[in-house]
Amino acid sequence: MHLFASLAAHGWHPAAWRVTGRPGFEGVAPFLQAAKTAERGGLDAVLLGLPTASQAARATGKLDGLHFDPLPLAGLLIGATRHIGLCGHWPADVAEPFHVARVFATLDHLSGGRMGWIASLGGPAELAGRFQRADHNLGDADASARFVELIEVARQLWDSWEDKGFVVDQASGTFADPGHVHPIEHAGRFFTVRGPLNVPRPVQGQPVIIHRDVPAPARADLAASADVVLGEPATLAEAKAARAAWQALSPKVRYVVRLEVVLGETAAKRAAELDAMAAERRLRFVGTPEQLTAHLAEWHVAGACDGFDILPAVMPVDLDLLAGEVVPRLRARGLRPDGYDGRTLREHLALERPLSRFAA
Amino acid sequence: MTRQMHLGVFTYPGGHHIAGWRHGSVVPGDILGYDYYRRTAEAAERGKFDLVFVGDMLAAREKDGRVIAQGALNNIDSISILSAVAGATKNVGLVATLSTTYNEPFAIAERFSSLDHISGGRAGWNIITTANDDAALNFSRKSHMEKTMRYQRAKEFVDICKGLWDGWEEGAIVADHSGGTFVDASKVHEIDHKGQFFSVKGALDLPRSPQGWPVMVQAGGSPAGLEFAATVAEVIFAAQSDREQAIKFRAAVKQRMPGHGRDPAILKILPGLLPILGSTEKEALAKEKMLNELLHPAVGIWMLSEQMQFRLYDYPQDGPLPTKDIRASGSAFTPRVVHLMERAGREGLSVRECGILVAASRSHGSFVGTPETLVDHMKLWVDEGACDGFNIMPAWFHDEMDLFVDQVVPILQRRGLFRRDYEGTMLRHHLGLPIPAASAGRLAA
């Protein structure tokens, strides 16, 4: 079973900030602490920068809608952790493929192969007004087509340096082998990119690509690039169907269910207090670590998913309980490894390192 | 009393001498990893440097569509490197280079605000408009934007960023646990900008960062760049190898600043400086010779051709630099190129020699000598008003950086030319720059 945690300063429940007893803003300290906790719990990765609330909800002033740019945040966490995967959300709506490829290749090198890109269309509501250019007011169909092309170009750029291209032979003075570093000469509907990238091939070949689930008809276009899909199904049956649909399109896809958790002996009371302050509609589990372990095992054994992305309702308590109380129980059931066997995020997820498409 | 100088270190994969990566002490497989950059940042902090600097390039080093076999990499992504080393350091400033021609202001404002928060107020932004024509071909553009236009765009870009950085008043985060109000919306000011290049409406999702704005750094030396520098720059990273020209340049920028309502005294100019040091003059010269022998002539000719936007590949390498043909090509030359052509004429340099000169220091200043004579050289530049300090460009990492920190810095300190310890935790403290008032950018935008 794969296990991620989505990080947030106060937690994923909209009222979390009211019960932590901590100041509203403490900079990056909560993220540093959370990443270390997640690594102690042997989690595969932490997910950074997924929106906790819609922009409209934030504007009410009732929510902690603060948001760090997840890329420098991922950079900071590289030095604070050694094994855990670091996945950053870069909304594709306004991204340029050369920047995405360059930044993620850099982070992948710096982290020794621990990066994942959460690629999604943030949607006009999230980005309205902040970026106004003609190509940012695309209709849904065109926005999706642009998104698919963007990912394709980024992946070509990562492939543009074959492993053999980065020679760095001091004796002969050969830094790169031009025969194994390729211009990509991409000329598509939305992007024209010559390449090659000016960063050698990432440690993982390509960083892990994480999609958020989309309505069924749109899945086919994303399947080719998907390593991980984050789903928010309402029921076990729905999860099972979504996983089967994705894996019919691409067998390697890891379908991961996002699940908010309120944990502990007093979980029900805590959840009721939180809900009294702010309502939420998200797939959620309320119970003891023992009960959560059984719940995760049930879904996993039923083939509903390949793992979970846990959204701690309140930080750090619900993450601490996940790492300290749930993970050991999952290990006892043989559902989680005892530690990190691999070096890279792809290795944690048992995903193959892709070959460069240019490699002979 | 002699003015204290400011020091930065410019990181680079391998080293700043283009053949530096071939030195036996460099482990070439390590030059992209976290430890490589952490070590440089830690050395800088041990040496009480003001800042660590990382460049930005948006196209591979190539010729006729193929990468240059002997040409080392440019910097990998600046913000990623500096956010990674932020956690390993406490005081040293972190200056990242990002282009206003190939980015969008909201994303960049958010990125620098995040870096400033992450580092506790140590961020700086080297604002460039990107000089490399090839970048356009990686960003779905047919050609690179014309220079005057690039600087107009840069000006508007920076104004928007300042407006966004100043959107949050002090005390906007209320976090009233019992009442349920997190943010006092009346203290968060959205911008609603509609200009020639951008329309941006909204506010960042972060409170104002410790320094308010990152330190504003600028690197261009052309007339358009100079005017832009006078408008926004607090630090200039200049390519200057001639003292007289550096004095003129510094005076020219300072002279223009009052016209933009700015105090010239705050400006710090830090030209790049590549030191090649030995315990004797002879040892230093031998080191320089060793490095230049490692330099593949093809790299030099390629770099020269790129800088001049003129193909030198078919000219005799040992013949004189064909300045007449180059001038006739009609390219718009950067001050660096003009300076090099003048020098080639004056000293009768061959194509190969010019190539080595460009490749060895990438037209920044270099100095070959002992730590004592280097300090004399640095002091002279500062005393004569050529600069306010230097951005040190070690020929290779890490030996040459350690050598500077361990042997040059103590002399600078002993002679009262450089701080013995940090007096603040923010980059603005190190550089003696004010924290901008919270409303400064809001009014401007």
Image (tube, coloured by chain):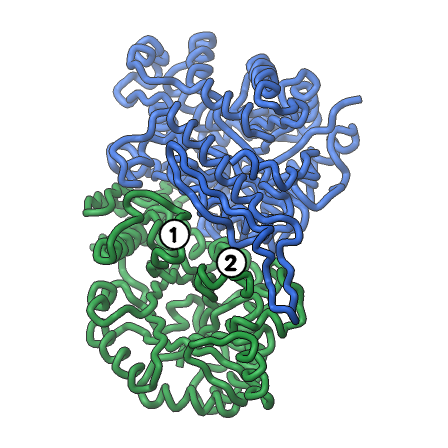
Chain colours: A green, B blue
Mark 2: amino acid: His
- At mark 1, the secondary structure is loop
- Determine crowd level at label 1: few under 14, some 14-19, many 20+ residues with C-alpha closer than 10 A: some
Per the image, the residue denoted by label 2 is A67
Instruction: State the separation of the CA atoms marked 2 and 1.
Output: 16 Å
> On screen, B60 above or below A167?
above
Residue B397 lies in quadrant: top right
Let me know if residue A129 appears in the view. yes
Q: Eyeballing the image, is B50 above or below A286? A: above
Name the mark on residue A128.
1
Residue B305 point in image, percent of width and height: 34, 24
Specify the quadrant that holds the C terminus of chain A: bottom left
Chain designation of label 2? A
Which residue does the image show at 19% across and 47% down from the upper left?
A: A189
Asked if residue B301 can be seen in this view, the reply is no
Q: Amino acid at mark 1?
A: Ala
Q: Is residue B2 left or right of residue A115?
A: right
Left or right, residue B46 beside residue A146: right
Q: Residue at x 56, y 46 (%)?
A: B167
